[in-house]
Every structure is written in C-alpha cells, then in structure tokens.
Image (cartoon, rainbow, N blue to C red):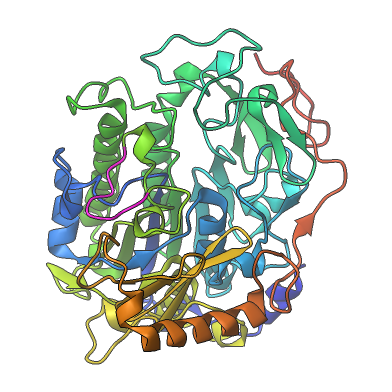
Amino acid sequence: MKPLLLLLSSFTLLHSAFAAETPNIVLINIDDLGYADIGPFGAKISTPHLDRMAKEGMKLTNHYAAPVCTPSRAAMMTGCYPKRVLPVPHVLFPAAAVGLSPNATTVAEVLKGAGYATTCIGKWHLGDQPEFLPTNQGFDSYYGIPYSNDMGPGAEGSKSNPDQPLPKAGAKGKGKAGAGKADAEPETGIKGPTQPPLPLVEDHNVVERVKAEQQHTFTRRYTERAVKFIREHQKKPFFLYLPHNAVHFPHYPHQDFMGKSGISLQKDWAMEVDWSVGQVLDTLRELKLDSNTLVIFTSDNGGPLNQGADNTPLRGSKGSTLEGGIRVCTIAWWPGKIAAGSKTNEITAHMDWLPTFGELAHCKSVGELKLDGKDISPVLLGQKGASGHDVFYYYMGFNLQAVRSGPWKLHLGKGELYNLDEDIGEAKNVAAEHADIVAQLEKHAETMKADLGDKTKDAPGVRELGRVENPQPLISADGTVREGFNKIAKTLP
C-alpha cells in the first residue's frame, strides 16, 4: 500500500454523512483545443452543448495549463507546478523509463479516500509502464491510449490526417508532431518513425492495436464508457476523469462528423467533442444528478496554430509561454451552485483542481499536502471577495520563462512587460515605463527559482521522478504484447 493511502485512510469520511453535500465530479480535458475553438470563447463552428454549458455555468477566462501535454496533466493530477512533480524537459513518449511517481498524491487518491468511485477514460500521458498507469495512481479503472494519438507508426495512421494517404512503413514524416528522425531515448521514450504500435489499454491489459480505422472511433467509445460509468455509479459519489485524445493531430473525427464544420478536420473534431459533452450533461440531467455534479471542461494547453487551432485573441501557440500556448478555454458547470452565465477573470490553473475538488468532497487530508494550487471553490461559487492566484509562474520544461501578478506579465528572457488587461495579445512592451513593476516581478521570479530552479531539474523543491528499469513498449512492432503486462501474452493483429 502506498504511504499516501495510509494517510488518506485516517481521514476517510463516511459517505452517508455527506451524501447530500458531496458532489460528483466530472473533469473533461480536451487535447490541443485552442482558446477560441469553441463557441463560448468565440469559435465560428456550432457547439450548442458547450454554449448551453457556459450559459448555465461559469467561464474561466484566465485559466492556465502548461505549454504541452505531459506537464499539464501532471499539474492537473497533483495540484502542483509540473516541474515540482514531473521534471521532464518536454513530454513523455512510448516506453519511457520515467513517469509520475507512484508515491505522488493524485486527485484520484484524494477523492477515493473520501469514498468516491474513480475512473480515467482516455489519454493519460504520465508514463506508459504499468507502474505509472492510472490504476496505480488512485483510479479504480482505466480505458484509453496512454499517450498521444500521434505516437505510433505512420503506416498505421499515426502521422497523417485521414484525408491524406498513409505513408509506407519506414517512411519519415515531414513537419508534423512525432515525425522525423528516429530517436530512442531510454529516459523519456521512443520518438520518430520507429515508435511502436499504439496500444488501447483497459486497466492493466492491452486490448487492442490502434490503427487508422480505430482512431475514428475513440471520441465515441470514450463517451459511451463515460455515460456507462455515470449510470453504474449514480448512487454514490464518483469522479470521472475524461481526457479525450481529440483534437490532437492527426485529426480523426468520427465519420459522422467528417466535413461537418465545412472548415477542417480539426474543427469537425471539435464539433464531435461538443457532441460528447452533450451526452455527458444530458445523462446527468436524465438521472437528476445535475444539481449535485460539478463538471469542468478544459484543454491541456493552447492550440497548435500550424494544425488549425484558433487562440484568438491570444498571441502564441502550443509549446510557448505566450498566452496562446498556456491559457485555455475553461467552463465550470454546477446548476444551482455556480451562477448561470457568470464569468471570472481571476487567475486560476489546472493545479487548483486537486485542492478544489478535495475541499468540495470534505477531504481533510488535502491540508496535509504541499501544494502549489489553491482551493478556488469560493471563486466558482461566487463568494464575495474570492480570489485566484496573486502570482503565477510560467514554466516550459525546466525553464522559468515568465511570471504574472495581477494584469502584469514579465517575459524574463527578453525583459518584456505586458499589461494583459489592456493588451491581451501581448503586442506592446511597456517595461521601460514601469521599471518598478519589472523589479517586483523579477523578485517573485527569484523566489520561485530558489524553490524549483531554472534551466535545471535539480532544485530543493523538485521531487523524485518515478523510474523503472528496462522499459519496454506495450506492443512490439510485430504485435506482441510485452511480457508480463497481460496475464497471458498474445499477439494483436
């Protein structure tokens, strides 16, 4: 048993005592969705379910993730800046030797300790070896692809959109994510055209080899699983974490949505995401769980502009600490608790979900954890005087690149200062006119560097990575499931 679980067990509260007050929690996390890729944040495509969700709930307009997938998900799961809990330079790839430590405290473990049923359905991306998977991180069950949908062989559909011909086996891609020169790194995994087949994992078993045909089905399959979980667990508190592979390149909307936007496959897939949200919310309404369920809709990072995302009016793209790379469209919905049609400009972040959910679930154990996130339930519930973060730090990998306090954001490398209230697009550098603000933000940066460091993973506040010896792909090139992963080794076609 993890030491954490021993801690949690001492604080576990009886469900019967709090059934009327303890909400179900649904966290929907979309992959690479741009700030303006949905209707409530300015998209031109039709997203009626998200439009209704925003009209019935709250838009979080200053909500921060991380510039890329893996660190964003680390913050979401642990309530900490990603560098503190998963210090890697970029993202994890198949067969990585490292991952989120099994000793880390996750939001699933916190909620499970309070009597919640927990499941993860979709993309995990915090390590693909058995020790790192969701069922070893507090989730009762898992169903999904353990990393991005472009991290597989090009000949099986992982390096090109479905409107393009599949490359031949061994061909090198050009200019797309995951393509290019082969690069095997034991630390962070296998990159490039030699990546192994994409695995679909259920709990601790590989159940399918994912090719182009299957990629079209996953938004629908994840949604069906999510609805099934809600129906099966409606009598007790539940935590549903639904991290879609959509809308990450390559873009594989279901055939029912291909061409529906009239713009691009990326926008078609965003429309299917809206459909999925509608299925979840409609199920909660049907079962009369809506008034006792908090639903969060968000993205793991800003959208990649070179793949059709729209971050208007923000400057920048996925992979940067400009606002367009890290600020994400986010909606909170809880009828009767969160004011309909409301909006907050408070600074909030993915690392806030663990303390917020823990507070709403009456998990006293949260107070024992060293977190960077804060409980933002007062913000969500519209309490007078509620506030978000006074200071927010923008890390890209090991590097501290910017710091924000109030409307002021300082890019440390270039010494550029922007007033985000007046200049959301970061177009006018006003550092020369506000030397006092620059000095104040530089002081904040030095405080953080003393804790988490800069340009190195070695710092007092950085925790140990999870690590395994001799990491192996979950499926080898010939389709053989790795020995010891499934109870019975098998070969998938």
Q: Which residue shows up at 71% across the image and 18% down it?
A: 479
Q: Residue furthest bottom?
A: 385
Q: Position of residue 195 (x, y in %)?
A: 67, 27
In the image: residue 120, left or right of residue 281: right
In the image: residue 85, left or right of residue 406: right
- Relative to 260, say whether 4 is above or below: below
Q: Main secondary structure of the magenta part?
A: loop
Q: Is residue 119 visible?
A: yes
Quadrant the C terminus occupies: top right
Give the magenta-colored segment's residue range.
309-316
Q: Is residue 314 magenta?
A: yes
Q: Nearer the viewer, residue 71 or 115?
A: 71
Q: Position of residue 400 (x, y in %)?
A: 56, 68
Q: Which residue shows up at 77% across the image and 67% down it?
A: 1
Q: Position of residue 50 (x, y in %)?
A: 20, 50
In the image: residue 189, left or right of residue 389: right
Q: Is residue 347 magenta?
A: no
- Relative to 61, say whether 154 is above or below: above
The quadrant in which residue 40 appears is bottom left
Q: Which residue shows up at 52% across the image and 32% down it?
A: 177
Q: Is residue 486 visible?
A: no
- Relative to 483, say whether 238 is above or below: below
Q: Which residue shows up at 51% across the image and 18% down it?
A: 157
In the image: residue 247, left or right of residue 214: left
- Relative to 157, say whether 4 is above or below: below
